[in-house]
Image: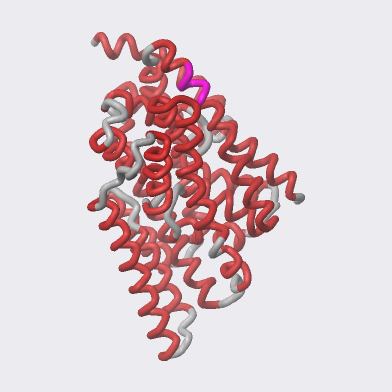
Amino acid sequence: MTLWQLVRYFLYLGTVGFGGPVALVGFMHRDLVEQRHWITEDTYKLSLALAQIMPGPLAAQVAIAIGYFEGGILGATLGGLAFVLPSFLMVVAISVAYVAYGGLWWMQALFYAIGATVIAIIAIAAYKLARSTNKRDPLLWGIFALLTVVTVWAQAELAEFFIFAGMVVLLVRAWPGWKLGVLMGLGGVVLGLAIWFLEFWLRQAGTAADSQDVLAQILLFFTKAGAFVFGSGLAIIPFLQQGVVQQFGWLTEHQFLDAVAVAMITPGPVVITVAFIGFLVAGLAGSVMASIGIFVPVYLFTIVPAPWFKRHRDNPQLRAFVDGATASATGAITGAVVLLGARAIMDVPTALIGLISLAVLWRYKVPEPVIVTISGVVGLILWPLVRVG
């Protein structure tokens, strides 16, 4: 594999990769590890673990991490840009139409059916990812089950548990001796507490910029979102809602729901919805500033620790920690499928759409963009009937 092959792949995935972070990281494993054999299982797991313990949206971080491990800073930069740029351009185009025509009714119709199909896509991706990473290891499957339950219960992906799971496997499978073991255990506790404190502080702290310049406010708000919100891009949605609707009043509740719908009906990272929000607030400049704010911290939080991860990738303690963190990630992803399914499957038609999509994808291996397109057409037909009924 060359760097340009990897960049072309991320450009392709950013253009046609539907399903949000859960599906996208699954596609990366399927395409790069299982089918094309461009990267090793260890590189993928190292990238996923690094993305899980750092703040920011999951899928973009995994893409940047893979780019770094395979091509250094240039690989991380080009891979990240290739992954994000297609969906950014699509969202800007939709934003222009949205502003011009005062809202897109068909967006709700599309999301009505596509949301159910997306659940089928990410359910299969989560299953395959868990099976390939946890294999037949009872400890990893136990961590998987625990994180699935915790994620559903908390209705959020809790980064503290990724640290905890990694430390458990490290201490059980790669005991370094009492002195190092105690130090590593204390380090894990400190890191977990630091993450918890950052999350707590962000919930309490104000997010307004001192400057009255709306572009500065947009940049600062989305930089904080990218820097301090842990979990996948979906975990950032509640934080964005609190800021852009309740705190700043930039968008109405209806407009924010439309923003989430835009993220779900376009390929690429879900967090690209910030480009839509920024456009509604301050046009193209707002869209660019929001995207810079959300992705620059993600980029830095990936490439700064990545050299250490790369140098110590054969260290038995790091390998054990990565196994635990990856197992916890698969559990959190599965929990996210349950949570998203409860929101997307809202009635009998969407339940049938989800089940049919699951059966077709499982049995016939239909490309995801094809079934998403078909689902969107079904939504356009059903939505007027359901809304009237």
Instruction: Name the residue: 59% across, 35% down.
Output: 85
Q: Is residue 233 left or right of residue 268?
A: left
Instruction: Name the residue: 27% across, 39% down.
Output: 242
Residue lying furthest right in this view? 2
Instruction: Name the residue: 50% across, 27% down.
Output: 284
Relative image position of residue 288 (x, y in whole percent): 51, 34
Between 371 and 84, the one nearer to me in the picture? 84
Examine the structure image and report whether residue 93 is included in the region drawn in magenta.
yes
Quarter of the view holding residue 44:
bottom right
Q: Is residue 142 left or right of residue 154?
A: right
Quarter of the view holding residue 89:
top right
Between 367 and 204, the one nearer to me in the picture? 204
How was the colour assigned to the protein in this rendering? Answer: secondary structure
Residue 264 shows up from this direction = no
Q: Which residues are magenta?
A: 92-96
Relative image position of residue 125 (x, y in whole percent): 49, 44
Instruction: Name the residue: 26% across, 48% down.
Output: 206
Relative image position of residue 166 (x, y in whole percent): 42, 69
Between 64 and 368, the one nearer to me in the picture? 64
Examine the structure image and report whether residue 234 is included in the region drawn in magenta.
no
Secondary structure mostly taken by the magenta-highlighted segment of the chain: helix
Relative image position of residue 152 (x, y in whole percent): 28, 49
